[in-house]
Amino acid sequence: MFVTETFARFADRLRGEPLPAPVIHHAKRAVVDWHAALYPGAVVAPATLLERALAEELDRGGATLALGRRATVRAAALVNGTAAHAIEFDDIFRDAIYHPGAPTIAAALAVAQDRGASGEEFLRAVVAGYEISTRIGAALGRTHYRYWHTTGTVGSFGAAAAAGFLLGLGPAPFAHSLATVATFAAGLQQAFRMDSMSKPLHSGRAAEAGVLAALAAREGVTGSLDVIEGESGLGRAMSDGPDWNRACAGLGEVFNIAAMTFKNHGCCGHTFAAIDGALALKSRAGRPASDIARVRVATYRAALDVAGNREASSAAHAKFSLPYVVAHALAHGSVRLDAFSPERLADPLLRSLMARVEVAVDPEIDAAFPGKRAARVEIDWKDGTSDSWLQPTRKGDPDAPLTDEDLEGKLQELAVPVIGAARAAALSRTLWSLEAVPRLDSALA
């Protein structure tokens, strides 16, 4: 049996078997977190620019964009998938170096709205997308992440699986949808090593690609079923020959959606351990940032490769600047959306502190990546004393999770400025009781 067929059979079983209550709850947590990231991302570029670019696909169709504008299914998946990744507040599956929610939930919601699916069907589709894609991502691993943006590549599988589930694809067409989307999968790391809008577009394109692959498979379009493990397939082309038997092990028994990381800072997740360590030192020392002479951060190599830039020339660029976000945490006590306002980006005192932040690779911490994300932070004070802190994980990781109350607070913090308190409160009530919602074409429109 090919890998695509193994995943297809899992999805087919998922339709009829009862899901454990904790799995449904974790799926709701993922959907709440996705909406928290969606709304602020929907009112900034590139999502706003995509609306202009896709004008012919809007104001018609069975799906909706974040603020209620009608859209075709593919356009909604593309725009919402982009918006949910735009502000860098969306979820992470740590072992795969992957943001599953932005593409997977965008695709699932677009199809669910178009078909009038129930809340429970929608949640099951989200679970299918998360379980299949996170296993592919973890198998591709660190070798894949050297050149490829996993959210763009692997996110295509999450979107195809969620869309195919909601379209009612049987095992054969479901497998073909995965086979087809494998050859759509793309997203280069180099695309966001400079200041650009490409990174969130990867997520949106993955959502759209998954929807297209599922719709095509429904109509009989076939793919190469061995495209994942074949000699010239995904695993060999984009990684170092992953163990696909291991990737498929535990399907339906171990649910990766229960081990998500939900972001506590509004920037690149590779910076989080350093931010948390800096905040811990700031709290323990009780001293102002003006007393700092030098900050040293030692962490894993990928954090420096992706977020080592010292320019922070724009909001998008600053979110991938470890020196900038650590300096901001020490100066202001947090790294939320206001950290990337024009005033903060131009603040000479913050820039001065940023210049005193040194970054390096710690071999021991690097060896534990991606399964563990740690950082060592040291501060030299102007009076000649020093403090150090080893941050072994990130707040929001599965071993230090955000609570439901934390996620609700995040939703309100990020959604209210965009949609208002009344609508945000109504949205929250719906999201936390999704399994009881009879139809999603109106509930989340």
Image (spheres, grey):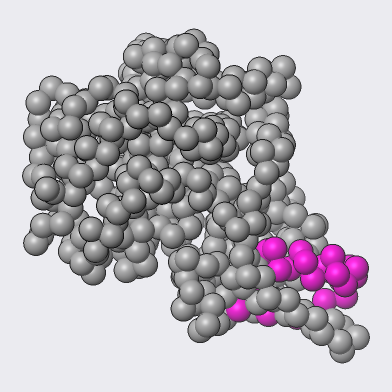
Q: Quadrant of residue 312?
A: bottom right
Question: Magenta residues?
Answer: 275-298
Q: Quadrant of residue 82?
A: top left
Residue 406 in the figure: left or right of residue 436: right
* Residue 4: percent from left, percent from top: 18, 44
| Residue 283 in sight here | yes
| Residue 106 in sight here | no
The residue drawn where x is 55% and y is 51% is 261
Q: Quadrant of residue 111?
A: top left
Check if residue 289 falls in the magenta segment.
yes
* Residue 152: percent from left, percent from top: 35, 48
Residue 274 in the figure: left or right of residue 157: right
The residue drawn where x is 82% and y is 76% is 292
Residue 262 in the figure: left or right of residue 138: right
In this orientation, which residue lies closer to the viewer: 271 or 18? 18
In this orientation, which residue lies closer to the viewer: 2 or 431? 2
Figure check: 189 above or below 304:
above
* Residue 285: percent from left, percent from top: 88, 72
* Residue 374: percent from left, percent from top: 59, 70
Figure check: 58 above or below 345:
above
Number of numbered markers: 0
Residue 209 in the figure: left or right of residue 432: left
The residue drawn where x is 55% and y is 57% is 269
Check if residue 442 falls in the magenta segment.
no
The residue drawn where x is 71% and y is 68% is 277
